[in-house]
Every structure is written in C-alpha cells, then in structure tokens.
Image (spheres, rainbow, N blue to C red):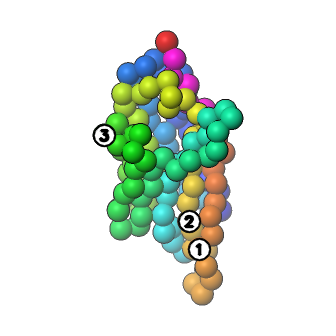
Amino acid sequence: VQLQASGGGLVQPGGSLRLSCAASGSFRSINTMGWFRQAPGKQRELVASITSASSTYYQDAVKGRFVISTDGAKKTVYLQMSSLKPEDSAVYYCNAEILRYIGTRPEAYWGQGTLVTVSS
C-alpha cells in the first residue's frame, strides 16, 4: 500500500493551494483519510480528516478556510486550502487508516510529506 501526495509549493498570503494524496496497492477498504502538518520545531498535528461515510473533522485554526474531500472511489483525498496564512507553512503529510484484509485490524499508512510555504 502506498500513499502518494502532491500539490505543495510556495504561495503568497491569502492565496490557495490544493493538496492531493492517492492510495494505491492491494487493500480491502479505507476507513479514514486525513492530512497532518508539521512546522519546524513543532509536533505533527492533525489538520483535517474524512471518514468513509464522508464525516469530516477540521482543526479550529483551519475551519472555514480548508476543505477536505475524496474522489468518487474514495482512494484519493484532497485538501483545498484557501486564505492561506504564514502560520500554515509546514510539511503536510497525508494519512490513511486502511483495512488490508477481512479479519485484520486497520493500519495507518503515511504518504511522503509535501512542503507548503506561505510567504510574500
């Protein structure tokens, strides 16, 4: 199972970016997909997540600015980020809780980080 993230970059304050993360490989289902971020000197934190039932969670700091969604197959998760602020600068990591086989427990998988820099 692999998670491939893309979409980071440099953007000015107030700008927008969309991150994508696609899951590939052999698995039964994906329970939850989400985005974490880690700024220099800080702990990794959950930014937003979405369940297979499309229930969403957002960290208070991004509510109203970020939108998490999945594609129809629910194997790709997107994070549309708008009204970006310098404090949103971080390495963003996608995460998925994946059930590989019936009768086993879901496991957490991580994509490679993608750097988001918000600066003028």
From the image, tell me which residue sits under label 1.
106
Residue 116 image point, x, y percent: 55, 30
Residue 58 horizontal side relative to residue 29, left or right? left
Dividing the picture into quadrants, the one containing residue 40 is top right
Q: Amino acid at mark 2?
A: Glu
Instruction: Tell me the mark number nearer the camera, choosing from 3 and 2.
Output: 3
Could you tell me which residue is drawn at 31 percent across and 40 percent down?
64
Could you tell me which residue is drawn at 64 percent across and 54 percent down?
110
Other-residue count near label 1 (Cα within 10 Å), few / some / many at <14 / 14–19 / ≥20 = some
From the image, tell me which residue sits under label 2.
97
Residue 116 lies within the magenta run: yes
Spatial CA distance of label 2 from label 1 is 6 Å
Q: Earlier in the sequence, mark 2 or mark 1?
A: 2
Q: Amino acid at mark 1?
A: Pro
Most extreme residue toward the left, as rendered?
64
Question: Tag 3, which secondary structure?
Answer: loop
Residue 112 horizontal side relative to residue 86, left or right? right
Dividing the picture into quadrants, the one containing residue 5 is top right
Image vertical order of residue 70 relative to residue 87, above or below: below
Residue 45 image point, x, y percent: 56, 47
Could you say which disc has been placed on residue 53 in the image?
Answer: none
| Front residue of this view, candidates 49 and 22 | 49
Per the rendered image, the range of residues in magenta is: 114-119
Q: Amino acid at mark 3?
A: Gly
Residue 9 image point, x, y percent: 55, 26
Instruction: Tell me the mark number nearer the camera, choosing from 3 and 1.
Output: 3
Q: Earlier in the sequence, mark 3 or mark 1?
A: 3
Could you say which disc has been placed on residue 64 in the image?
Answer: 3
Most extreme residue toward the bottom, as rendered?
103
Residue 55 visible (yes or no): yes
Asked if disc 2 and disc 1 are in contact, CB closer than 8 Å, the reply is yes
